[in-house]
Image: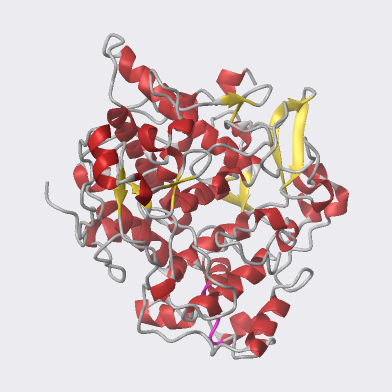
């Protein structure tokens, strides 16, 4: 089959090879692979798209989408102070949610949080779908906030492919603690009532990507993917008279269904149909890497739009709390040490700590709840993150606990261009200074040269009513995800663009949505009897 426009295949040497275990261990050398206690791959080992053996690259570096555009402002201590003040708790970006009323009223009485309006076009789970995708393709290897950091010394600790290596690790040979032996299936444990991630005695999850245990919803999503793989394996074996199928066959089918969801369900919801159709017809216009890479404009800014959609609290399930719904704040600093805290913080196991997915995705039962709109108001719990949730790959200092502050200081770290400069480059409408007058009050011409993350949020708010990304945010996010899919010879978009999902779907043959994946996995409301 011919390559899609601008695909620019960037498969690494050895991708999909059929190395024996002995040859793999002898030729690659275990010294090139760093294993966590969970058996997960870290450092320089990354998984090939569908192989059970890791593909070895040079260290992955972040790149730039617009390398010729100047930073939004000259770095200085005064600039950093302005960004910290702009993004402080209680400041102009804080939705000032009345957390004292409790998690139930924050959800059931939306008038209490007028700065967290509903998005009727998305369900609550879309936020966590984006977080799960982000954890699959990008992780900063330890740059310093608010201090310029050269891209030549940047490191992306994740494999920049949409291939679920955050779930699969290095496969059964390299990450054996993630799997059962015969037949090869993912280990899944119970949290009391329903599935949970495998955990050690101290509650630490045994997973390839530790960030997928940051909160209950993301850990539940990871567990659902473990069960999805196992369910697909069982279906394939049943279709062959219980004859064993290869791990690679199962993984390929799982990954392709996930890629279908990313391209056909998730991306149209967040970026709109027009940019998707343009990419499918004409390929990327602004991001054409020669090898798999993530630009800092995506990693540090545009794809962080999801932080704006996090609600202060959620209904985790409908009947897990002694037969009643389990409502909880996303984070609560006052209750972190409890074995069963009242918040949705991860790393804990208790009977009520499971996800009732009918709240987060639409199963046609009327229980799905809307997402929050994209805007420049961030839910209050995100201004005081628990220090244990701040990613410190190199053991550095915790630094600011406001997520908004960390996002803005990253623009200084990477010398990112202003949103206005990118809008001009791509031919999009440029927000006027009056549209950002509140930001401009902090000096440094921030109303006319705005940090990209903040610009993307305000653009979505003003141009798309917060329902989806505006033209700058949509173009950056869509082009990067398109390039990762179209340039990977193992993806369905590159290997076989005529392929259609073949697992059961409520939407009909040849379709597949996140609700269908959860149904096949056996974590849907019907399978739980809820």
- Name the residue: 28% across, 8% down: 241
Side (left or right) of 226 relative to 367: left
Please identify the residue farthest to the left as the structure is shown: 1
Please identify the residue farthest to the right as the structure is shown: 100
**Does residue 117 lie above or below 405 as drawn?**
above
- The quarter of the picture where residue 81 lies is bottom right
- The quarter of the picture where residue 342 lies is top right
Q: Which residues are magenta?
A: 448-452
Instruction: Please indicate, yes or no, whether residue 501 appears anywhere in the rendered image.
Output: no
Instruction: Please indicate, yes or no, whether residue 113 appears anywhere in the rendered image.
Output: yes
Q: Quick one: 192 or 382, which is closer to the camera?
A: 192
Residue 170: % across, % down: 38, 41
Judged by its main secondary structure, the magenta piece is loop
Please identify the residue farthest to the top as the structure is shown: 241
Side (left or right) of 265 relative to 440: left
Position of the C terminus, as image quadrant, is: top right
Q: Quick one: 251 or 55, which is closer to the camera?
A: 55
Residue 192: % across, % down: 69, 22
- Name the residue: 42% across, 73% down: 153
- Name the residue: 77% across, 35% down: 340
Residue 254: % across, % down: 36, 33
Q: Quick one: 154 or 236, which is closer to the camera?
A: 154
């Amino acid at each position: 089959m011919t390559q899609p426009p601008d695909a620019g295949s960037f498969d690494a040497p050895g991708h999909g090879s059929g190395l024996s275990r002995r040859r793999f261990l002898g030729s690659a050398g275990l010294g090139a692979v760093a294993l966590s206690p969970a058996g997960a791959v870290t450092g320089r080992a990354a998984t090939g798209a569908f192989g059970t053996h890791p593909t070895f690259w040079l260290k992955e570096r972040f790149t730039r989408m617009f390398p010729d555009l100047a930073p939004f402002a000259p770095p200085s201590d005064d600039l950093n102070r302005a960004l910290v003040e702009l993004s402080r708790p209680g400041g102009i970006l804080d939705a000032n949610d009345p957390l004292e009323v409790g998690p139930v009223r924050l959800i059931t009485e939306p008038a209490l949080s007028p700065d967290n309006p509903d998005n009727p076009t998305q369900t609550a789970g879309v936020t966590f779908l984006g977080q799960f995708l982000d954890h699959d393709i990008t992780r900063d290897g330890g740059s310093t906030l608010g201090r310029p950091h050269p891209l030549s010394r940047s490191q992306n600790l994740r494999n920049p492919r949409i291939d679920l290596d955050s779930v699969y690790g290095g496969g059964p040979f390299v990450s054996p603690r993630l799997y059962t032996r015969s037949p090869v299936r993912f280990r899944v444990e119970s949290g009391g009532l329903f599935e949970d991630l495998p955990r050690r005695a101290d509650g630490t999850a045994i997973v390839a990507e530790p960030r997928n245990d940051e909160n209950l919803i993301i850990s539940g999503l990871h567990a659902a993917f473990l069960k999805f793989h196992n369910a697909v394996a069982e279906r394939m074996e049943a279709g062959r008279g219980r004859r064993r199928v290869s791990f690679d066959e199962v993984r390929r089918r799982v990954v392709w269904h996930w890629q279908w969801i990313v391209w056909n369900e998730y991306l149209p919801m967040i970026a709109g149909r027009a940019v998707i159709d343009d990419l499918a017809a004409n390929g990327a216009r602004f991001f054409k890497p020669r090898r798999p890479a993530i630009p800092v404009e995506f990693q540090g800014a545009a794809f962080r739009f999801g932080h704006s959609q996090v609600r202060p609290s959620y209904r985790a399930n409908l009947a897990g709390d002694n037969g009643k719904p389990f409502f909880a704040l996303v984070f609560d600093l006052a209750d972190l040490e409890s074995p069963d805290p009242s918040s949705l913080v991860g790393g804990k196991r208790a009977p009520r700590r499971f996800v009732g997915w009918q709240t987060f995705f639409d199963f046609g039962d009327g229980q799905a709840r809307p997402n929050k709109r994209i805007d420049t108001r961030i839910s209050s719990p995100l201004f005081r993150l628990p220090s244990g949730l701040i990613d410190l790959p190199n053991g550095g200092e915790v630094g600011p606990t406001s997520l908004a502050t960390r996002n803005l200081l990253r623009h200084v770290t990477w010398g990112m261009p202003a949103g206005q400069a990118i809008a001009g480059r791509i031919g999009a409408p440029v927000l006027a200074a009056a549209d950002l007058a509140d930001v401009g009050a902090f000096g440094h011409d921030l109303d006319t040269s705005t940090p990209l993350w903040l610009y993307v949020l305000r653009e979505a708010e003003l141009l798309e009513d917060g329902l989806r990304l505006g033209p700058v945010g949509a173009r950056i996010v869509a082009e990067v995800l398109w390039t990762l899919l179209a340039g990977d010879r193992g993806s369905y978009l590159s290997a076989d663009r005529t392929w259609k999902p073949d697992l059961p779907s409520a939407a009909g043959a040849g379709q597949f949505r996140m609700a269908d994946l959860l149904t096949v996995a056996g974590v849907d409301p019907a399978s739980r009897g809820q």
